[in-house]
Amino acid sequence: MAVEKPPKPTVTGNRINGGGEKVEEHVDIVRDDGSASSKLPVAMVRQPHPLEHSWTFWFDNPSAKSRQAAWGSSIRPVYTFATVEQFWSVYNNIHHPSKLAVGADFHCFKCGIEPKWEDPVCANGGKWTVNFSRGKSDACWLYTLLAMIGEQFDHGDEICGAVVNVRNRQEKISIWTKNASNEAAQLSIGKQWKEFIDYNDQIGFIFHEDAKKHDRAAKNKYAV
């Protein structure tokens, strides 16, 4: 399904119109630049375009992470969307990766799947990762989201979600998948992803199990 971009919705205080909800605990990701001033057309509000899956945005605030002892305990769901219009109403009114604080992690996962290794759907999976210079991942983050929610991958059922990690010198985007041992599916996802984001360098796939055991020393099992 192609996800076309409608006009921007209205933002009022902490509420995002067009199916939005309050995100008071996540003000670090909400834009407040006054750029979203037009309303969705009445016909669009009355006739939403449903997605095949519902998706949830999650945010891991760097200041919250510093106060937590256990990894992943500071991740919080921000918003769940099920239509094209709801996606754009959120995306147009939150900070893009280049504007997020260093240390932030922003996820978009299928509804019901938590962006954690311990989640049963993710436990036997892995991830493809693409690296960018600081402030250069915005366009590819959007293209990744559109490819996922628009079901553009041949093995879309294998995909759990995506995450962008903002760090001092770089930003990383990763796609998480369910069954890391399904080599054919993982290679297909990696090749298609590179095409969707127009990325020419080699990318690697790491099993979550290896990442847990070896941390940064974990080696790629697949590459495209």
Image: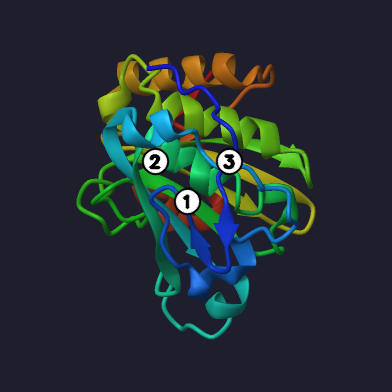
Horizontal relation, residue 217 to residue 79: left or right: right
* Location of residue 33 by image quarter: bottom right
Q: Residues within 10 Å of mark 1 (few under 14, many from 20)?
A: many
Number of numbered discs = 3
Measure how far apart labels 3 and 1 are at the Cα level: 10 Å
SS at mark 2? strand
If you read the primary sequence from the N terminus, does the residue marked by circle 3 or circle 1 appear first?
Answer: 1
Q: Which mark is residue 143?
A: none
Identify the residue at horizontal 37%, vertical 23% (top origin): 186
Q: Are marks 3 and 1 in contact (CB under 8 Å)?
A: no
Residue 203 in view of the camera: yes
> Looking at the image, do the residues carrying marks 2 and 1 touch, with CB atoms under 8 Å apart?
yes
Element under label 1? strand
| Residue drawn at 61 percent across, 61 percent down | 30
The residue under label 1 is: 107
Q: Say which residue appears at 40% left-offset and 15% top-offset.
A: 188
Q: Amino acid at mark 2?
A: Gly
> Residue 148 placed where, x, y %?
41, 29
Q: Amino acid at mark 3?
A: Ile
Colouring method of the image? rainbow
Q: Earlier in the sequence, mark 2 or mark 3?
A: 2
On the rendered structure, is 156 left or right of 203?
left
Please give the residue where the numbered disc 3 appears in the rendered image. Answer: 173
Residue named by callout 2:
161
